[in-house]
Amino acid sequence: MQAKLKSELSIIIDSILPLVQKPGRYTGGELNSIVKDWGSIPTRVALAFPDIYDLGLPNLGLAILYDLLNKRPDVLAERCYAPWLDMEDQMIKHSIPLFSLETRHPLSEFNIIGFSLPYEMLFTNVLNMLHLANVPLFAKERNDLHPLVIAGGHAAYNPEPMHAFFDAFVIGEGEEVLLEIVNTYQAWKTSSMNRPELLQNLAAIAGVYVPSLYHVNYMPDGRVESISSQHPNASLPVTKRIVGKLPPPVTNLIVPYIEIVHDRVAIEIMRGCTRGCRFCHAGMINRPVRERPVDEIMAAVDVALKTTGHQEVALLSLSSSDYSHIQELVDKLSERYASEHLVISLPSLRIESFSVDIMDRLKGSRLGGFTLAPEAATDRMREIINKPVSTEQLLETARAIYNRGWTTIKLYFMIGHPSETMEDVQAIIDLCKQVHQVGRSIVGGRAKVHAGVSTFVPKAHTPFQWTSCDDPGNVLEKQKLLRSGLRNPNIKLSWTDPKDTQMEAWLSRGDRRLSNVIFDAWKTGAKFDAWQDQDHHSKWLAAFTTNGLDPAFYALRERALDEVLPWSHINSGVHPRYLQTEYKWSRKRKLREDCREKCFACGIMPNYNSLYQPNWYCPPPPKSSWRVREKQHESTDQL
Amino acid sequence: MRVRINFEKTEAMRFTGHLDLQHAWMRVFRRAGIALEHSQGFHPLPKIQLASALPLGYISTAEILDAWLIESQPIIDLVKILNDNLPPGLEINSIEQIPLDAPKIQVALKTADYLVHLSSQTSLQNLPVKVAAFLAEAEILIERRGKRRDIRNLVELLEMKNSSDGQQAIYMRLSARESATGRPDEILIWMGIDPFETLIERTTLNI
């Protein structure tokens, strides 16, 4: 009977696929996807990505977990992405529940649904997917028969806005902890324990946050008064998990039937960044820096190219130039694949002529342009954000780029940094023009500059977590200035809609009360909030009003340094006192050096002393002194 | 060495479009470790040519791809190594070596045969009448991308046929020249059949 039902669902799915755009998003069966025997495997995990297939498939985090889970004989992992609006309509019309791509089983029939939460704008899609899966949205409404619904990823470092919808969050890197969650689940499944007991057992795993086991008290003005644990297993704080040594890269990457955002092999060469840019969420939460050996990367590239047939390899990291063997790696790769038309892309290069040498060595296409991210255009602002790249250095790098045959330079800036003035914005205009002038003098009329100017959003666990997001009115003025200042057919300007920035700002530093706002926004139709063509701003504002909350409280309020932040029970590994010092230094325009050579005791070593590996960028200190510091932290970490 | 590969495109591959199919074949060759000739210029592309675009959602048991290999090798080895590296939904029927100066496959192509598998919802009763009515017309003008076109002269054959599973199907042979390409769905619509209620299979490309 069961099998018959499945085939019926599959037949209906097949019948609607010709009616939707890009049906290849929903077929499954791609090369290197793993289809296991549903009936004979005890633990079934659905890995869900709350955006469309085209964006979700290249996500390396999910690929890693898919690989790890499926390596276990007692577990199967299948994928699910958010259906685009046309597919959703067809699914509703034909009563098709959200299904997995591998075996087309309804998500509700899995034991565990694990969502990836890379950024906040996807929150409503999570609700929409749970709804399409016929799984109760609120964790408290789910019983023993429902799947365990968990989440992880960068946006989970402040889990509070989504606390009501997930049974548990993974804080940090999932490679080890997800397997521990599966073990705990399996032990529970074969016991006679109830669902609350499962959650309590999960909370005992380091790095797992079970929101229902904590209580938050608010002050009358809406600020958090205290966060308390309601169960001995619910630790305060929950400290993020990391892997001391990065496991070998995934090489059997799934090859889609249709063109997606990145058709390429992605290999992570390094995790973390030592630069310490104060606005950067990824730079703070991904510490410590861990490198992969060149030989391991070479071997992985080789296998991955053979198993996928891709023509492009992307070497991923937060700052590729800082990978200590970058020259050796690039030399070896370009030598090894010299005759094979392989494209090697290296994102996030530093602004220095060495980067141009490296890109030149790769002999890649010049068509896409060369990307640099100065982020700010005045020395004052560079000191505030701790990204000291002088104008001279930028222009020199631009000169080298145009000299080597590129005609387009992409420059990424941010407006809305703390204490930014119109002069700082005008400097962005001037700098773009200067770079374009450099280009004109070298390649003449073909010289182009693309200026991508996004708006800064303060993020939890960064030195700017206390600061206010720039007022939308200011942002509009600044964008107006940029548009009028950069009226040049050879300088292309792109910017972020202030409404999108506001939404991201509410959710990034939100508290538990936002769960109901997210629910109401979704209920009234908000989804795919990251998509330019989906404007749900008024629905969000209405949802705030319904819940008696003020969006400005979340986005436009400077927090006192002693305020209990809604995420203060989550320990990112970097100590809040270090973040405070960074915040104070930024106000004094004081720069913090790259921590590669010198340790500034951000908190990583005392937190992860036992996992230390020689390939970390953290200098190995005498162990005894760390033990002492560890003790000090213990005594000051109490909330 | 220039080879002509006759292949099937079925299963989930039916939702892979023309350009994506080209990419899929490029990856097959790369996985197989068979180096292809590349075009000259700033952005060199592997030299492969597909005979004719198959509309999204159709399956085919007879697609044709020409590929220019840098190194010659026995066809029998080629069949094996390519077969080992195909994605689900692609299957090779045959490979033959053809002269380097043979005409472009898109130019050589004359007609294409289609078998339209009808779903249970389609009423078979009036079908022979509709087929006869279509053939009886001297000219059938429809609008395609804003242009008036005669689809009657694109049809060489149109008849009822039993498919391999014993079900009634419609068989058609349509012009497949570069400037005059017949589309099965336009003929079905003229006969009052919803193309989405059928499964269309291309069975032969006639050179």
Image (cartoon, coloured by chain):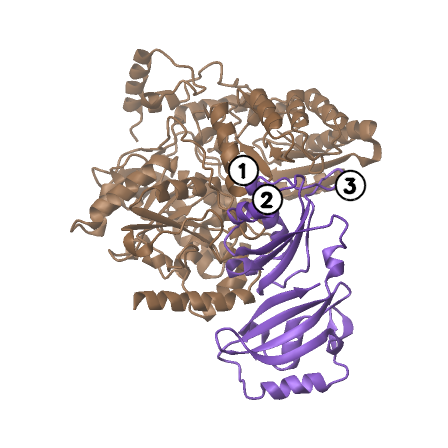
Rendered image quadrant of residue B175: bottom right
Q: Report which residue position mark 2 lands on.
A: B29
Q: Colour of chain A?
A: brown
- Residue A362 horizontal/vertical position (percent): 65, 28
Which amino acid type corresponds to the residue marked 2 in the rendered image? Phe
Res. A305 mark: 1
Q: Report which residue position mark 3 lands on.
A: A487
Whether labels 3 and 1 belong to a single chain: the reply is yes
Q: Colour of chain B?
A: purple
Q: Is residue A468 visible?
A: no
Which amino acid type corresponds to the residue marked 1 in the rendered image? Leu
Marks 2 and 3, how far apart at CA: 47 Å
Q: Secondary structure at mark 1?
A: helix
Q: Quick one: B187 or A273, which is closer to the camera?
A: B187
- Residue A216 horizontal/vertical position (percent): 31, 42
Mark 3 and mark 2 in contact (Cβ < 8 Å)?
no
Residue in view at x 39 percent, y 54 percent? A516
Q: Is residue B100 left or right of residue A344?
A: right
Compared to residue A237, the image places residue B201 above or below, namely below
Q: Is residue A124 visible?
A: yes
Q: Secondary structure at mark 2?
A: helix
Marks 3 and 1, how far apart at CA: 44 Å
Res. A484 mark: none
Chain for disc number 2 = B
Determine crowd level at label 1: few under 14, some 14-19, many 20+ residues with C-alpha closer than 10 A. many
